[in-house]
Amino acid sequence: MVLIDTSAWIEFFRRDGDPAVKLAMQALIEALEATLCGPVEMEFLGGALPHERRRIQSRFDILPYLSNDQKIWRQAATHYATLRSQGITVPWNDVLVATLALHHNYRTYAVDRHFEIMATHLGLRLYTPGYNGAFEPES
């Protein structure tokens, strides 16, 4: 499974979004490999225009949803502190998304360089689409 970050959803829904990201997102959805979490849904829907929310929510409603609890928040705080101790500042919301992916042993698809940094320092596994955006299973 692949937890999709807000940055990829933005490209997917944007009219002039990156075609490579759009293809990759469509392939993840069609392969039933895309997952959603509360922090991504809140961040994305919070920034969406009111007339777009219903369409976006209908897409989100079909995806598996990763819930979180106090243990996840505490682990995210530990990850945040680990990064800060190494002089790395990453938005807390991105750390929470990464922590959820790590907790569930999922890969993360993002077009945000913060996730590349976290992959290096936290062991986060990133998703890389296959040829022409095709779903790329783990090897």
Image: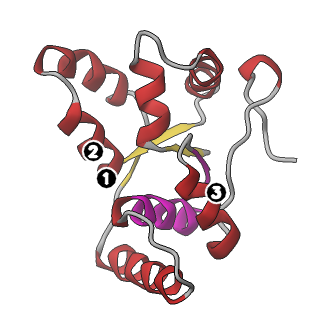
Q: Is residue 56 magenta?
A: no
Q: Earlier in the sequence, mark 1 or mark 3?
A: 1
Any part of residue 111 in sight: yes
Q: Which mark is residue 29?
A: none
Examine the image and state in which quarter residue 129 appears.
top right
| Magenta-tinted stretch | 94-109
Query: Which residue is at the far top?
Result: 15
> Crowding near pointer 1: few (<14 within 10 Å), some, many (20+)?
some
Gap between marks 1 and 3 measured at Cα: 19 Å
Q: Is 6 left, or right, of 54 in this rendering?
A: right
Q: Residue visible at 66% across and 64% down?
A: 119
Examine the image and state in which quarter residue 67 appears.
bottom left
Q: Mark 1 vs mark 3: give the one in front.
A: 3
Residue 30 pos. (x, y %): 60, 20
Q: Is 6 left, or right, of 26 in this rendering?
A: left
Query: What is the secondary structure assignment of the residue under circle 2?
Result: helix
Q: Residue visible at 29% across and 37% down?
A: 44
Residue for badge 1: 39
